[in-house]
Amino acid sequence: MNTVFRYLIATAFLVTIASCSTSGGNENTMVLIKTTSGDIKVKLYDGTPLHRDNFIKLVNMGFYDGISFHRVIRDFMIQAGDPSTRTGLTKEQLDTLDTYTVPAEFRREYYHKKGALAAAREGNNVNPSMKSSGTQFYIVQGKKYTSEELKTAEERLNSGLRQVVFSKFIRETADSASVSGTPLSESEIQESASLKMFNYLTAEGEYKFSQEQIDAYMNVGGVPRLDATYTVFGEVVEGLEIVDKIAGSPTNQADKPVNYIRIISMKVLN
């Protein structure tokens, strides 16, 4: 087994701030992404240290070198990092890389404006804690929104968040009752979870787009429906035209580019 990937597999899912102290001293680390369509420079946010350090670790190991953009949707995003698109990996390596995750790091100031760098993840039905994929990322292209469209997006976002939070309270209530040895009926679980939900909404309120977000989504563009549910951990500082170029590439019915678009290499610049 390749030494680089043996080390990656052994340590990837243990990524923490302490284990990646080499990057902690850098403020807003820059990474150059060289692709077959052109260069993109991204800035990594210090406010999401788990994702920042995980990304730096993978870049320094050369994991992304040779990986392709496997999912591209015009007016939405371009996605890469699927280990299966990288040649030379064994089934054991693929299985390990496909399953390791990074805890969510949602920050209100980091949102899905055009050029946002974010972590892909599995859906809420199998990933209720919204943990990020260890390797897959996407860069937002998005589109511009009207005020009415943003209002609708905000309503749908809150509806989805309520479902996620309520499902969490249901599971926690049922698990707690089971562990205590006093199982509750379904109606009792629902009643307890509903009370927790009421207290949560009273304390937290609903998610509201800030004026900064509204201005960005109306004037620059993005994908507001993903806010507060997918971790944004950086943004493009140079090469948005390359993101547009890749996003405009012809794709098949599975959103895979018809013409192979590859990451040649990635390099940490500071």
Image (cartoon, rainbow, N blue to C red):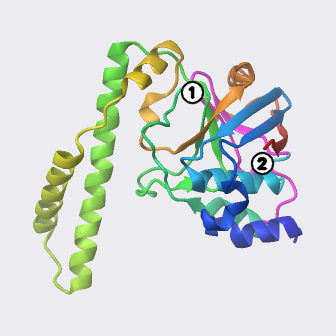
Residue at the spot of label 2: 85
Q: Nearer the viewer, mark 1 or mark 2?
A: 1
Dividing the picture into quadrants, the one containing residue 157 is top left
Tell me if 229 is positioned left or right of 91 in this view.
left
**Neighbour tally class for label 1: few under 14, some 14-19, many 20 plus, Cα within 10 Å:** some
Q: Amino acid at mark 2?
A: Thr
Pointer 1 residue: 76
Is residue 251 something one can see in this rendering?
Answer: no
Magenta-highlighted residues: 66-90
Q: Which is nearer the eye, 166 or 251?
A: 166
- Residue at image position (47%, 50%) is 123
Q: Measuring 75% from the left and 32% from the top, which residue is drawn there?
A: 41
Residue in view at x 45 percent, y 58 percent = 126
Instruction: Say which element carries label 2.
Output: helix
- Amino acid type, label 1: Phe
Q: Which residue occupies the foreground of this view, 211 or 265?
A: 211
> Circle 1 sits in a helix, a strand or a loop, which is it?
loop
